[in-house]
Image (spheres, rainbow, N blue to C red):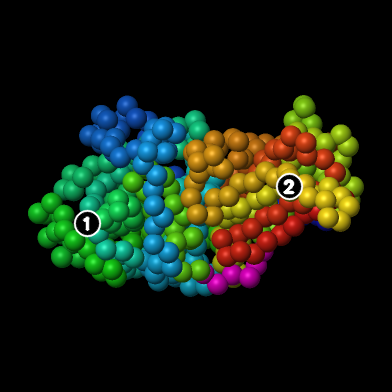
Amino acid sequence: MLYLRNSLFVFQRFFQILVLVGFPLFLLQAQANERIQPRKLLLQQGYRQVQFPTQALQSAKLRLAQKDPSPPAALSWPVNFEDASHSMGNNMLQFQSYGDLPYFHGGCDLRTAKGAEVRSPVAGRLEAGHYSYDTNPDGSMTKFFKSWPEQGEDLYFEVAVITEAGFRYEFHHIDRESLPTEIIQMLTVGGGEISVGQTLGYVAEWPVAGVGGKYYHHTHYNIVGPTGVRYNPEYFSKTLADQKAPRIFGVFAVDQNGLGTPLENGGRAPLPMPSEFVVATTDQRELNVYTQAPPFLKLSFAPSLPSGIHYRRLETQWDFRSRLLDAKGNFPQLWDVFKKSLVLPTGIELKTEGNYKANFFLFRLKVPPGGFGPFEIQVQDAAGNSSFFRMN
């Protein structure tokens, strides 16, 4: 319990200090990492809704009829990261909120130097244009697009490569004004074939700073399947070195009134068992300054039974290591994954946050029917490092 209180105090104190030292207000009120606009306004601006299915529009029948194959694995990263401290920014699962409806980030921010080269990790057909999104209540985004040579907002220009299997590799925040001549020539005649390793463009100058005041120059990297499923670029790219496990700030038993009671790691399991646990957790790679959302959480009950007796292990998990789908193959509902806020018995309120100001995540793990007694919660990052919380 002391560790939990100290962790929460450090977390809160960090942001108090941030304000006291004069952290620039324009950094806290920054524009969204992705361009978000109401659908009506986008249509008025000449954007068109993309026609390939999105998570919000998919039906179970469509997914069964058109199940995506897996993308190729161990792909080369399309950029050189700026340095070891500035590599992966927001990851695919990241909770994002910039004043509009919150949403899943859906891809990976690859932090680079300004003007860094972006190379294609796959071969395929070239497309480019300006994009925007309208957010949906479930945390998905509906995409809108203006194809080349139409004009749009400078920062939100995309170059994409579409493979023969129908996977779309998207690279956002490309500087349109410095596109390679070869790419411009292809786009002018309606597209062309891209080879592995070919230069697609260069990273635009990002006007907003992130952690430590370092400007957040990056390309947002998406892998979108033929049916609109978001695949995790981390999972299908070469593994980035990381031996630092996610941090569990606390685990809370949530009562029927929504109050969160802190639990002690290694203590006795609560009786009666609550309907759900909330896990306050973050992940941060070795040396990397950016905080991320762990892509895998699992709650497992392991009742003590005599040797030789087999039982069905009761589990609840969120597994977003490879794709943004729940255990049933559906798009995950944002507020099923995350708890918006949690009030502790002390009156302290914890909140799920994700923006340039703060990243902190409250994950919900429902207790499965029949779950009781000793349990274990595992939190794992993209590199396979795990942290555990156990109760007897």
Q: Give the residue number, with chain letter if any, for mark 1.
A: 125
Find numbered disc 1 in the image and state the secondary structure of the residue it sits on.
Answer: strand
72 sits to left or right of 178: right
- Residue 242 drawn in magenta: yes
Residue visible at 54% across and 39% down? 328
Q: Amino acid at mark 1?
A: Arg
Please name the residue shown 34% across and 65% down the image.
Answer: 121
Q: Which residues are magenta?
A: 240-245
Question: Tag 2's secondary structure?
Answer: loop
> Where in the figure is residue 321, as x and y percent of width and height?
54, 55
Is 67 rendered above or below residue 56?
below
Could you say where residue 355 lies in the image, as x and y percent from the top left? Answer: 53, 47
Q: In the image, is residue 194 above or below residue 18?
A: below
Give coordinates of residue 270: x percent, y percent: 87, 40
Label 2 sits on residue:
313
Q: Is residue 144 left or right of residue 386?
A: left
Measuring 47% from the left and 55% from the top, which residue is drawn there?
Answer: 232
Closer-to-camera residue (305/92)? 305
Q: Amino acid at mark 2?
A: Arg
Residue ID at (50%, 41%): 329
- Main secondary structure found in the magenta portion: loop
How many neighbours does mark 2 have within 10 angstroms: few (below 14), some (14-19), or many (20 or more)?
A: few
Looking at the picture, tell me which residue is in the foreground, 191 or 179: 191
The extreme left residue here reads 189
Ranked by sequence position, the earlier of labels 1 and 2 is 1
